[in-house]
Image (cartoon, grey):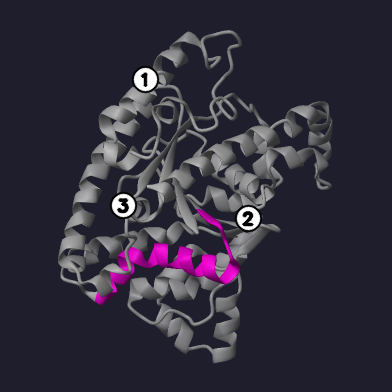
Amino acid sequence: MKSIAVFNNKGGVGKTTLTYHLGYALAELGYKTLLVDLDPQSNLTLFGLDPEELHNIWQTEEEFIDDFAQARDEKPLSEFEEIARDVRSIHFLLKPTEDGTDVPKSLSKPLKLHDNLGMIPGRLSIHTYEDRIASRWNDVYGGDPLAIRTVTQIRNFCELYANNYSYDYVVIDTSPSLGILNKVIISTVDGFLIPCMPDMFSLYGIQNIGKSLKNWKRDFDTIHTLLSDIKLSYFPKNFVSFLGFTIFNARRYAGQGTWNLSQAHQHYAKQIPTTIQDYIDHDHRKHLSPAQLEDPIGETAIMHSYSTLPTMAQKYRRPMWEVPDCEELEKADKSTISGNRQRYKDTQLPFHIFAKDLLTRLEQLEVD
């Protein structure tokens, strides 16, 4: 199993839409993939679940999120195990660790999106787990078992699901924050990619990420010098690697430069590789060739605007290329979608190209 985080310090770059469609592309290419929604806004979850279904999941979990041990002990064992085995949010999975109690023996089943694609839904309350990471962080240096478990439990669950459901890849959607939750997520996955808009804000976002990576790696290097081999076995052997960037959903200007972007957007887009090399340390990107650093993942495959297509994809909870064949299309949408049927269908191949290039970059980690 390889774990991937999709991350940018700048919001509004299409990160969640990209994550969802990447998951589908990997699944269609034959790779068993798990999506994990660790953005408190839970927008990725709404790609897979009707809001009412999500409400029912959250409502069932509510008493456990308040006090896991008390809610568990007040129920008959058979009822608790039935709840624990059903589709549950990522916060439900992490809550026993947050509260310092035993993790259920039964692993909650993932939400099935496709034969090869599952999802662990998000939850707005995940911020309390972030608070617990912050309060226990310093205890990691002393080898405290609960603190170590708190910091490594997200990665641990990725591995558990991979082992139990034979997932090849776990793809994590994150918030734009540089807080301690993302510090733990990014530092303990195998690789991360940055979706960008071709603007000044994405350049500053990359700068912020690069500066944070320096600090995060320093902290994890310290942990590796202090802990025993047994306790270090809970952590990944290597610090995260940078897999590259992509420009996503930018407006196309045919014939304008090599990437068909407006002059203003081209100006910023061409600064992205230089900004990466200036701010993301060589150790995090040493497996990438000069060409891979210069070009977006998949080159221009998914770069240009999809207009309202992602909105329809989320509304009907399926990838853009499947929307025209959806049997539940509302009457008001049918004519518009039908008239753009080929445009919807044409989105599939670019995401497959993008996914294949991303996998090539992941495979290079194994060589290193």
Q: Secondary structure at mark 1?
A: loop
Query: As shown in the figure, which amino acid type bears the numbered disc 1?
Result: Gln
345 horizontally vs 295: left or right:
right
Q: Which residue is mark 3?
A: 239
Residue 192: image x %, image y %?
42, 44
Residue 40: image x %, image y %?
44, 53
Using the image as rendered, state which of residue 66 and residue 288 is in the foreground.
288
Query: As shown in the figure, which amino acid type bears the numbered disc 3?
Result: Phe
Q: Name the residue at 54% across, 37% down.
A: 357
Q: Are marks 1 and 2 in contact (CB under 8 Å)?
A: no
User: Between marks 1 and 2, how big is the CA–CA gap?
Assistant: 40 Å
Q: Secondary structure at mark 2?
A: helix
Picture disc at residue 271:
1
In front: label 2 or label 3: 3
Which residues are drawn in magenta? Answer: 145-170
Residue 245: image x %, image y %?
44, 33
Query: As shown in the figure, which amino acid type bears the numbered disc 2?
Result: Pro
Residue 162 belongs to magenta span: yes
Vertical order, 213 against 293 (above or below): below
Using the image as rendered, state which of residue 93 and residue 359 is in the foreground.
359
Q: Name the residue at 79% across, 32% down.
A: 337
